[in-house]
Amino acid sequence: MGATLRALKKSKAAALLIVIEVALTLALVVIALSVVSERMQNMGRASGVDEARIVSFSSSPIDPKTYAPEAAFVADRERLLLIDGIESVYVTNSLPLSGGGWSTGVTAVAGKDQDLGAAIYMFDENAVGTLGLNIVAGRNFTADEISHRQDGARLTAKVAIITEALAKRLFPEQSAVGKFVSLDSDLPTLDTQIVGVVERLQAPWTGWGELEHTIMVPVRPADGSWRWVLRVQPDALERVLKDAKETLAAADRTRVIGRFQQTGLDLRKKAYSQDRSMALILGTISILLLIITALGIVGMASFWVTQRTKQIGIRRALGARRADILREFHLENALLTGAGAVLGVLIAYGLNFLVSAENGMQPVPISFLLGGVVGAMILGQLAVYWPARRASQVAPAIATRSV
Amino acid sequence: MFTYQLKLAWLALRRNPMLTALMVVAIGMGIGFAMTSLTVLYHLGNNPIPQKSAHLHAVQLDAWGPEAPWNDNGDAPDQLTYMDAAALMKRAPAERQTALYFTLLAVQSDNPEIAPARYGFRATQRHFFSMFDLKFRYGAAWGADADQSAARVAVLTAPMAEQLFGSVDPTGRKIRMGDEFFTVSGVVELFNPKPKFYDVSQGPLNEPDEAFLPFSTAIDKQLNTSGNNNCWKSPGEGWEGAIRSECIWIQYWAELPTAADQAKYLEFLNAYAQEQKLLGRFARTDNNHIPDVVEHLVLRQVVPNDSKTLVWVGFAFLAICLLNAVGLMLTKFLRRAPELAVRRALGASRKTLFMQHLVEAGVVGLAGGVVGVLLTLLGLQGIIALNPELREFVRLDISMLLTLIAVALSGALLAGIFPAWRASVLPPAQSLKTN
């Protein structure tokens, strides 16, 4: 230990550089990896929808005034169900992960004491099956409950299905089924009855605070301007999508079939593209940084080995074993990276504190800081192994030479 | 002397190719990351209309509800209600101003080969084209009377005109849009500013608008907004309910060239807010603003936090790479102590040795810069692969390229100062003696 410290004292500047480099690397990698893990958690959240089985496209009438959406829906639905590979269909205003939709304030309390934000999806009796939702309490909509919305009319519904997360907020400790809510907290007459609860169905906006709060109403969108959602047999997605759009377009030229289309997986990819690229970039930076710092340690340690060749020879001649020399270099590295790691944890903590206050970054978990220290020590020990081995192989005879 | 030093530096660098390569690659990667993230930030923070940005002002009126402000910062909302937009169009003191919103409209060609399709329309007023410097390929904007009378006219963008009419001038031709025929009054080149500053409510990199129709026509035809719409109070029933609602869905811009124009306009907005307060609206009467384009983009946080974070990370990465280079140069220079001692003994001054090492550091920096340019190009390709919507406007221009080389060179020189100084002050006698 004493010898190690004395050796370090002789090259203060270089030792200090290693400490700072390790500290900065650790701080940056720990923060970067905590962001990566946060983003990966986001990306891993289930939408509730059986995404691999879903395709979607829009359709809207050219002249809403002369269009009869109810008859058109029935005819189009039949055309679609004839296509091989399509299991079920429904029309809606929006889907999870799509980034566009409606929200409202919902309340279970007459008066204005409660106002929970929730997304609204228009459903029919086939929607639950099409999306592959899991009803955990109550029942699905029935065909006779479904109505067509009039354009501009207030959205009302006698019955609704909600998500479990919303049910728990509206009716803590009770079953939501059979209870009444208002879908518009400005008009708190509780006239919508909850008939069912689904395990999960996310709102369309992945960055929204109320992501798990969703209400489904038995209504078809107004004017025949809607988004078709098809449940398709696996591995037929692309073909079915093409067939479906061509069939509808050819059958009736009074409406426009959307140029844009998505599979459930496209929606997920797009919704999380920023999270994915952030995770990828920060992950890459972390790995490169670790490599560069490790190589820096190798370079510096090699230099010290060269510089101290003569002393090592003398110590070997005086009886130090190879293992002693090896240990000396490993110990030296442990001291430097240890100091760097402690400093790095402080920097990471301080930086995180500053940055999280400014742009809402989550605090770095303690486990990441501890993991960073352990990781830095291991990396340091691995990096110094090669130069240390070279040092241990210095022959005692070197001591007798003049250079 | 300089070429001699360059030669020495070259020889020295060739002596430890691994160490040299490590320094060059480390600096190159640092530069690559820092400059890739900076390039993205630079383009996201781009002024999309530099020639006029100071004259164009977004109009913000705080008509949001009394219960809570529009956001936690207490900013005014970025969009207006129809009632307020209509009042401003009629009464606000600006030569050129326009309300706008985005809507989708089905368009049907006479040609049965072309399937009917919905296009993205911008409902606006005729001043839009001159305010935002759109370039007409054919025809011209509709006239003031069209704005007044809700005429069925439209301006198409060139790509849409080509899809529908081929490469002929369609000015004056009629085309079915929705349930009526519209007359084409002109064709503009695609207007695709990045960021899409005049309406960032659907994301700053959103698709460009495909066609334009008069605001009054869109309202007359009861075309709902297909953009962003926020309400603090439920709207009434039907179209009447929508246009009398407190819902905000209309963007509004005014061209105000002088400070006097701006002061007058703001004064009008505040007076208008006071007047509306008497009618029971406007809980906050003094929260009205007219940010110019650049201020508007800052307010709307067009540059995502992630991009800013990446710039910090990129430069921290560069700093660590440079620190790494300091350490490696230090070891490299000090390793030559005996050689330096001989040179000192033969009469080389400290300054000469210092300069020689600095030149060596500079060579490493330049090489690192070249590697950095390549890695930045690679990095930008990677960014585009991850975010295809950035494709059109993330690129390396000459000024970024020069910045990049300058950063690499000055970074390496900075990193070289300490090692070079240490090498130049080595006491020659000691090294000579022991060797």
Image (spheres, coloured by chain):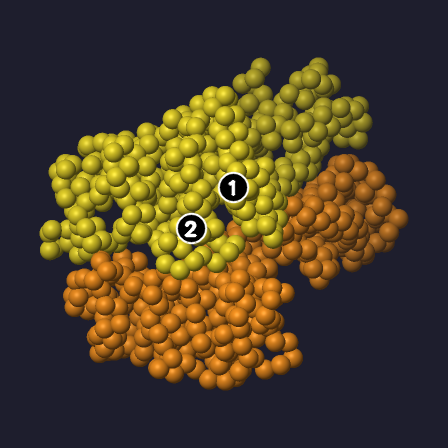
Identify the amino acid type marked 2. Arg
Question: Is the same chain shared between marks 2 and 1?
Answer: yes
Question: x, y percentage for residue B212?
Answer: 28, 42
Residue A57 is drawn in which quadrant?
A: bottom left
Residue B147 is drawn in which quadrant?
A: top left
> Compared with residue A9, is residue A289 higher up or lower down, i.e. above or below?
below
Residue A134 appears left or right of B117: right
Identify the amino acid type marked 1. Gln
Q: Chain of mark 1?
A: B
Labelled disc at residue B89: none
* Display colour for chain B: yellow
Q: Residue furthest front?
A: B278
Q: Which residue is mark 1?
A: B276
The front one of B90 and A254 is B90
Q: CA distance from mark 2 to mark 1?
A: 14 Å
Labelled disc at residue B244: 2
> Among the chains, which one is orange?
A
